[in-house]
Amino acid sequence: MEGQAILSAIAELVRAIPRSGLLVATIVALVAGWIGSMMLRRKIAGGRLVRSVSTLALVGILVTVFLQVARFDPRLDSMTQIGLPEQTIVGAETVIPMAADGHYWLRANVNGVPTRLMVDTGATLTAFSSRSADAAGLEPRPGGLPVMLGTANGTVTADLTTVESLSFGNIKAEGLDAVIAPNLGNTNVLGMNFLSRLEGWRVENGDLILTPGSAFPQQ
């Protein structure tokens, strides 16, 4: 079963190549490096230059991937604002009651569009269904590396996006990273990349209480 999951993940990644500029660039750089090595082996002029350019391209891609992954860690925020909006959360303490199904649901405005999200402390990323993303005008981030997500339907690829504004209760977030997950169904998830930027969150008497950090101004 584990081998099947790995093969499924590889297949999803291969299917994502045509729509990911970063993956295409990686393949081109690898092929160019191989060509450069063959040119050097056969003593063809320019082989060293081709291989050097390939190596520099791969280093640039590696740095880009690192910055993309590091965006989800608030401790590295100071290193990851290059070319991307700063992720901020402001406001006052907000209380979310537990629903009858045992989950915490909230009605948020995503880029001004009312959107229902489930707070999921087990989800690394905030994720939107294709339908909700279209309604809120969320677009895949150009050049982003597809993210692999495990869902009830297996492993799927999701596109990175940026939420310009997400607000609910007394809290407002701007520049928030998220993903668009085609196979998510109708459920949208508020994940740990949002919760970890709060000063804290806790459950009291069955209610989930979210508290923005002291580094953020209070409304």
Image: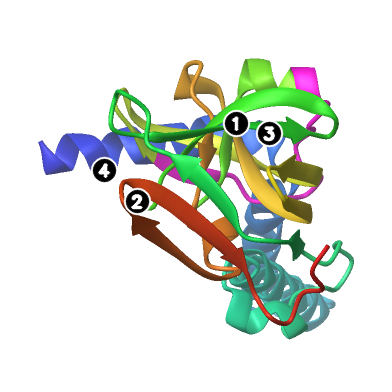
Q: What residue range appears in magenta?
A: 135-149
Answer yes or no: is residue 123 visible.
Answer: no
Q: Earlier in the sequence, mark 4 or mark 2?
A: 4
Q: CA distance from mark 3 to mark 1?
A: 12 Å
Report the amino acid beneath label 1.
Answer: Phe
Residue, far front:
205
Task: State the mark number for residue 6.
Answer: 4
Q: Earlier in the sequence, mark 3 or mark 1?
A: 3
Residue located 48% across and 56% down the image: 209
Q: Which residue in the structure is indicated by mark 2?
A: 122
Task: State the mark number for residue 128.
Answer: 1
Report the amino acid beneath label 3.
Answer: Ala
Q: Is residue 128 magenta?
A: no
What is the x, y in percent for residue 87?
A: 76, 64
Report the amino acid beneath label 2.
Answer: Gly
The residue mark sitting in front, 1 or 4, is: 1
Answer yes or no: is residue 4 visible.
Answer: yes
Q: Is residue 95 above or below residue 41?
A: above
Mark 2: secondary structure: loop
Q: Decide: marks 4, 2 in contact (CB < 8 A)? A: no
What is the x, y in percent for residue 65?
A: 64, 66
Residue located 37% across and 28% down the image: 99
Q: Is residue 103 left or right of residue 163?
A: left
Q: Main secondary structure of the magenta part?
A: loop
The residue mark sitting in front, 3 or 1, is: 3
Q: Is residue 30 left or right of residue 54?
A: left
Looking at the rendered structure, the number of numbered marks drawn on it comes to 4
Residue located 63% across and 53% down the image: 27
What is the x, y in percent for residue 142?
A: 81, 45
Task: State the mark number for residue 108.
Answer: 3
